Amino acid sequence: MYIPTPSSFDPDHRGHFGMFGGRYVPETLMPALLELHSEYEKIRFEKNFWTEVDYYLKDYVGRPSPLYFAHNISRELGARIYLKREDLNHTGAHKVNNVIAQGLMAKRLGKKKIIAETGAGQHGVATATICALLGLECEIPMCAKDLAPQQLNLLRRKLLCAKPKAVQSGSRTLKDAMNDAIRHWVTHARDTFYIIGTVAGPHPYPMMVRDFQAIIGWEARRQILEKENRLPDSVIACIGGGSNAIGMFQHFLEDESVTCIGIEAGGLGVESTQHGASLLKGRPGVLHGQMSYLLQNDDGQILEAHSISAGLDYPGIGPEHAFHKENRSVHYDNITDDEALDAFVWLSQKEGIIPAFESAHAVAYLKKLPDIAGQLVIVNLSGRGDKDMMQAKELLHFD
């Protein structure tokens, strides 16, 4: 059974990873955050809590997710490539790992209502699913910009009885959906629990969500040792806010022989203004209760991010990723929209696995990884591509 363990990369008592992280929130939210932090400190290593989480992860989600040897792309690239199949989880992505644990925490705290933001919709679907399971009320602001291409996930949430809300403010993207969720939480903190979908936001969320998603790397480490009798040379994951990546990296970060590689959204190219490469092109600032790298202009105004993937068009990054960039403990790079779309088709036609556009960014990096021949590589396939098929239909000009 997975239970988190203390890490040398844990934040300090105020939630800082070096200079990043912290709690930059309105005074009215501090009691809720302090209550959450106190509760999480009690259950972080508590066997009874993790036994309950484990029950749902196994019998409801279907964990452990397989580590699949991708025969055909391995042969083509001359490497041994494994895919961590988070796309096979119930609800179709890694998001459910985190949401189950946060939903159970909400119940422990006596909260009856849930607020959660969503971009591509996978976090929204996972949240609505767990709220249906646990009998919680649910409201989920979603970026209006993504309503048309993500109709499937919107319909799923409606069926699950979540109250949908199209966010029309600002750039109408994930940033604005998160703004809306935080505004709602500020005025309803007494009876509402905010389920954040990534390793961002005020402390303790970045640490807490990382702990919940670290089951990915915990499983992958055990699986690769069983299959190959050694650790991988590289592990690769896409990054929006960064939860699937930090979850995969967590159990490999202290192994000097393993290179952890995070892939940001290169959009139309990082030399353009149409990308989501916060670590490469951003600089430190404060957004959504945390200090991290942000895309911003000279006046500190947040810029609009762009990606083919609705889950990667976020103008910031989780604070632990900002720390790893500064610390050089993770290698970060980016993949363009065109490269991701090519990888979407490539994996579909080579392995019969349709990845989410987000995951396709990590898959695409296989073709850019230096000296890949002979390497042992794990790619985190964070979600499946069902949700992206209508957008793919237009981009690939299917009849």
Image (tube, rainbow, N blue to C red):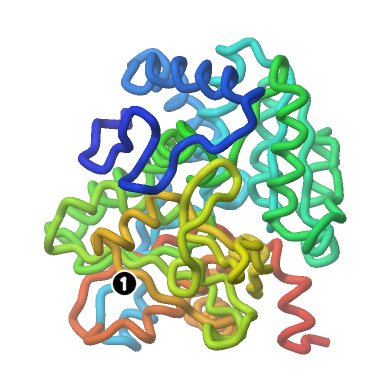
The residue sitting at 53% across, 69% down in the picture is 353
Q: Which residue is painted at 69% across and 56% down in the image?
A: 174
Decide which of 365, 353 is in the foreground and name it: 365
Q: Classify residue 24 as left or right of residue 186.
A: left
Badge 1 density bin: few <14, some 14–19, many ≥20, Cα 10 Å: many
The answer to whether residue 98 is above or below residue 170 is above
Query: What is the x, y in percent for residue 185?
Result: 72, 30
Q: Position of residue 250 (x, y in %)?
A: 30, 48
Q: Is residue 181 left or right of residue 203?
A: right
The N terminus: image quadrant: top left
Q: Secondary structure at mark 1?
A: strand
Q: How many marks?
A: 1
Q: Tell me: 102 left or right of 330.
A: right
Residue 219 lies, in percent from the top left, at: 31, 45
Q: Is residue 241 above or below residue 385?
A: above
Residue 135 placement (x, y as % from top left): 72, 19
Q: Residue, x 85% and y 36% (percent of image)?
A: 163
**Quadrant where the C terminus is found in the figure:** bottom right
* Residue topped by disc 1: 81
**Can I make out residue 213 in this image?**
yes
Query: In the image, is residue 122 above or below residue 163?
Result: below
The foreground one among 140 and 136 is 140
> Does 269 sit above or below residue 264?
below
Residue depicted at 51% across the width and 44% down the height? 290
Asked whether residue 339 is in view, the answer is no
Q: In the visual, does 353 lie left or right of 14? A: right
- Name the residue type under label 1: Ile
Residue that lies at the very extreme toward the front in this rendered image: 299
